[in-house]
Image (tube, grey):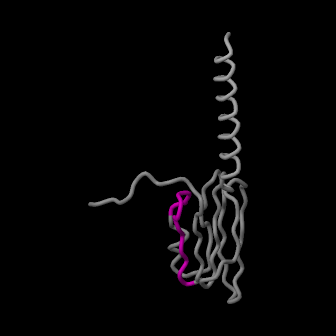
Amino acid sequence: MKKNDFILIGTLLILGIIAFILITLTKSEGSRVLIIVNGEEYKDMSLEEDTTFTLELENGGWNTFVIKDGYVDMIDASCPDELCVNHKDIHYNNETIVCLPNNVVLQIIGGEKNEVDAVAK
């Protein structure tokens, strides 16, 4: 090995270390679900930790949702129509589950990007 080989290896090593540091510093926190009640942020929770959460509202209503394997699913609600309970589970960025009677919104932040922009029939 010659002097130029050592210079090339050293330069590549330094560039690799710099790239690793930049990636580590700019890394996002991960996927989260933002809970919005009456238009105000109530709480945000990580999608990486499996849990069941019941949100008890001031009017006596409730919404219960499950975070499991990076997905959020509303499993119970006090609203009469329960459209939010029948909604599919969510995990893509900016996907939401809305319970209009209880004024509750679950929104994914930092989730994976959905490959489908729109569906036309």
Compared to residue 75, the image places residue 22 above or below, namely above
Compared to residue 41, the image places residue 5 above or below, namely above
Query: Can you name the residue that lies furthest to the bottom here?
Result: 59
Please tell me whether the stretch drawn in magenta is mainly helix, strand or loop. Answer: loop
Which quarter of the rendered picture does the C terminus lie within? bottom left
- At horizontal 53% and vertical 57% (from top left) the residue drawn is 92
What is the x, y in percent for residue 76? Answer: 62, 70
Query: Can you name the residue that lies furthest to the front here?
Result: 3
- At horizontal 63% and vertical 65% (from top left) the residue drawn is 33
> Which image quarter: residue 71?
bottom right
Residue placed most toward the observer, 22 or 69: 22
Q: Look at the image and give the residue range highlighted in magenta.
A: 88-101
What is the x, y in percent for residue 5? Answer: 65, 17
> Which image quarter: residue 43?
bottom right
- At horizontal 57% and vertical 81% (from top left) the residue drawn is 79
Residue placed most toward the observer, 17 or 95: 17
> Which image quarter: residue 54?
bottom right
Residue placed most toward the observer, 90 or 31: 31
What is the x, y in percent for residue 30? Answer: 66, 55
Horizontal side of residue 79 vs 30, given as left or right: left
- At horizontal 66% and vertical 62% (from top left) the residue drawn is 66
Residue placed most toward the observer, 50 or 62: 50
What is the x, y in percent for residue 17? Answer: 70, 36
Compared to residue 49, the image places residue 85 above or below, namely below
Horizontal side of residue 88 vs 32, given as left or right: left
* Count of picture labels: 0
The stretch drawn in magenta includes residue 112: no
